[in-house]
Image: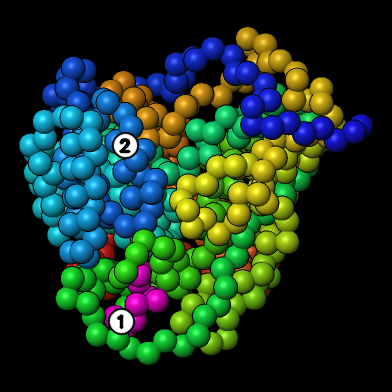
Amino acid sequence: MGEHRVSRRGFVKAAGAAALAAPAIVPSRVLGALAPSRRIQVGAIGVGRISREHDLPGILQHGIARVVAVCDLDAKRLAEGQQLVEEHYRRKGEASPGVRAFHDYRDLLATGEVDAVVVSTPDHWHARPAIDAALAGKDVYLQKPASLTIAEGRQMSDAMHRTGRVFQLGTQQRSTEQFRVACELVRNGRIGDVRRVLIGLPVDPSGDEEAEMPVPKNLDYDAWLGSTPRVYYTEKRVHPQADYSRPGWLRCEQFGAGMITGWGVHHVDIAHWGMGTEYTGPVEVQATAEFPKKGLWDVHGPFRVEARYANGATVIMSDALPNGVRFEGTEGWIFVTRGAYAATASDPVAKGKSAEALSASDPRILASEIGPDGVHLPPSAEHHGNWLEAIRSRQAPISPAEVGHRSTSACLVSHIAMRLGRKLAWDPQRERFRNDDEANAMLSRPQRPPYETAAQV
């Protein structure tokens, strides 16, 4: 069968805008007094690069919400984030009571003005503010990955379910049509039984040693380090002071795992969606990776992960593969990628390198229609809007907490295998490695007080 490609405009049209099939997730006792006529009052925790270029624009475009507060540990970024939001409302001609600015996110959570928060902080500051927000009765949109460690992710997901808050992980590929179409076709057997899923990811470069620098007066560096160890300040460990280009913390294992979670959570989430394994994970993982032997930036370089799932499929992740997700089945294959979409201007892969968003081994696969009795995945036109609508309806959004935790944990299990360089047996139900104390010790990290997640759950 010949290969067939289509552009983003040539996708198979989705069947009508069906409502989310998920049941209501919040009991009436915790719904609060959010009347349908009232706008959702949103607070932005972290107003750096991803917030300014992706999350704030994602919220501000929707009339059912209003950003009323911003928070950041960098006073300069805090002021510029406040200005960005206030200027948005001035341009729209809306009378504005002003946007409140907070240094400490806990003070933002304590105000009765905020119904929900968007958490756009570095990876090591994901789980704790999300948990605190849920305990404060706020709904949560959280940038991926869901957590720095698997233990933190479990605490976060449990807190969301225990409090009944509406949670959305920032895996926005679910709200991009080609990914939903690809997963629907796979789920409906259009390529037969899935045997293998190939995931291509970018990698980050290593860096030089960097000398200690004075901490900028506008940055609360101790709080920025959070639960991670105290280390000296240098600008390339944190974020640029002059602009909003890609920050150095993304390349430091102290604060994240590198591209295996930074981009991997997006693609693993799609692999899980297509395979129907959203609430589980691999049962066996082996991996190899190159790690820098010196320099400040120490996340992984070239790598290869092979993860086996209980359904018999094998997921292979590597920087040597094309960026995207390729489902291979007994009767054909489907490849899906972002195409011309980029979340920020500093995404590490140029748009032109992944311009063709959806392709298949046979044109009939993409053209086939899914009948009323088939699997229909919920459509979402925009990820932040999907979350806001879920706050109104009190139904699960498209990337809820447990699904986000499982996408993240599959990547963190892979990272542990990359670090250990040997085959690991994973129990996705118990979330433990089988008979491997060394690997299990890597499910969590020591947390520096007073920033521990375990302190509040």
The residue located at (37%, 30%) in the rendering is 385
Horizontal and vertical percent for residue 2? Answer: 90, 33
In the image, residue 450 sits, relative to residue 282, either above or below, namely below
Instruction: Give the residues drawn in magenta, as a range.
Output: 230-240
Looking at the image, the residue that sits furthest to the top is: 372
Q: Name the one closer to the observer, 192 or 244.
A: 244
Kindly indicate the quadrant of the structure image that contains residue 212.
bottom left
Query: Measuring 60% from the left and 54% from the top, which residue is drawn there?
Result: 350
**Label 2 neighbourhood size at 10 Å, few (<14), some (14-19), many (20+)?**
many
Q: Is residue 199 left or right of residue 69?
A: right
* Left or right, 331 with reference to 128: right
Name the residue nearer the viewer: 378 or 38: 38
Write the residue at 11% across / 47% down.
100
> For the residue labelled by badge 2, is the local secondary structure a helix, a strand or a loop?
helix
Question: Which colouring convention does the figure follow?
Answer: rainbow
Residue under pointer 1: 233
Q: Which element type, helix, strand or loop, lies under badge 1? A: loop
In x, y percent, where is residue 283? 64, 52
Give left or right: position of 334 versus 252: right
Rendered location of residue 225, percent (x, y): 29, 72
**Residue marked by disc 2:** 59
Report crowding for label 1: few under 14, some 14 to 19, many 20 or more residues within 10 A (C-alpha): some
